[in-house]
Image (spheres, rainbow, N blue to C red):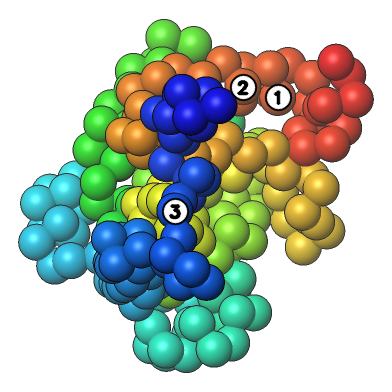
Amino acid sequence: MQLRIEQLKALTPARIGVSRSGTRPLTATWLSFRADHALARDAVHSEISAAFLNEFASARQFPQIKTLAESRRDFILYPPKGKRTEQSTIDELTKVCPSEIDVQIVISDGLSALAVEENLIDLLPMLEYGFALSKINIGQIVIAKYARVAIADQIAHGLKAKVALNLIGERPGLSCASGLSAYITYNPGPHTVSSDRTVVSNIHKGGTPPTEAGAFIVKTIERILDKKVSGVKLQQLG
């Protein structure tokens, strides 16, 4: 039985088979929990660094916008503010971004800006290469600060894109504080609900590697564009 537990522990970062001393966890177990909890809290409060924006976004002239949230604290306390931006911001994007494209990519800090910085450098080149091979037009990439999943729907709708692709930092857990997800929506807009979205999650070095995830996302969007549906409707097609 002990061997079986050790084999299971080797397959997952989850806390299984932890020992106790009486009714309390062992010191090492408790310290490990506290350390991972601190990492998760730090990730939630993290912001995309100026260095990353300067080296990655500014160099490629990615437009940078902010949602209705005024600060990180405002974003955390009032989730709906992270789902939309001012209409004036959308109007400005229409002046600098191509419209009527296949896929509008939005990079969002979400609940872990750390996830964006750790994974995007490897993920984005794979996406761009894959879309180019598939002759899928991705237009201009937008970076959204204090953003949640639905912000991509508003941006893509404003730019008349067929598909919204939001690359967003996910809610951190005790086993990973830097997981990224890709939320993909066909025909995004005010009518979009959660079941309309196809999700590729667990993108990080301890889960699905960014390069592998990029290839899978491209293939998924190829199918979405072909079938003209995403989310639950896409799943129902088998």
The answer to which of 153 and 82 lies nearer the viewer is 82
In this figure, which residue is indicated by the disc labeled 3?
Answer: 19
In this figure, which residue is indicated by the disc labeled 1?
Answer: 224
Residue 168 as seen in the image, left or right of residue 30: right
Alpha-carbon distance for marks 3 and 2?
A: 42 Å
**Label 2 packing within 10 angstroms: few (<14), some (14-19), many (20+):** some
Circles 1 and 2, Cβ within 8 Å, touching? The answer is: yes
Give the residue type that dot 3 points to: Ser
In this figure, which residue is indicated by the disc labeled 2?
Answer: 220
- Quadrant containing the N terminus in the rendered view: top right
Alpha-carbon distance for marks 1 and 2?
A: 6 Å
Q: Residue at x 44, y 18 (%)?
A: 215
Q: Is residue 208 visible?
A: no
Given the current orientation, which residue lies at the most extreme top position? 133
Disc 3 secondary structure class: loop
Q: Residue at x 31, y 34 (%)?
A: 205
Please, is residue 164 above or below residue 35 in the view? above
Give the residue type that dot 2 points to: Thr
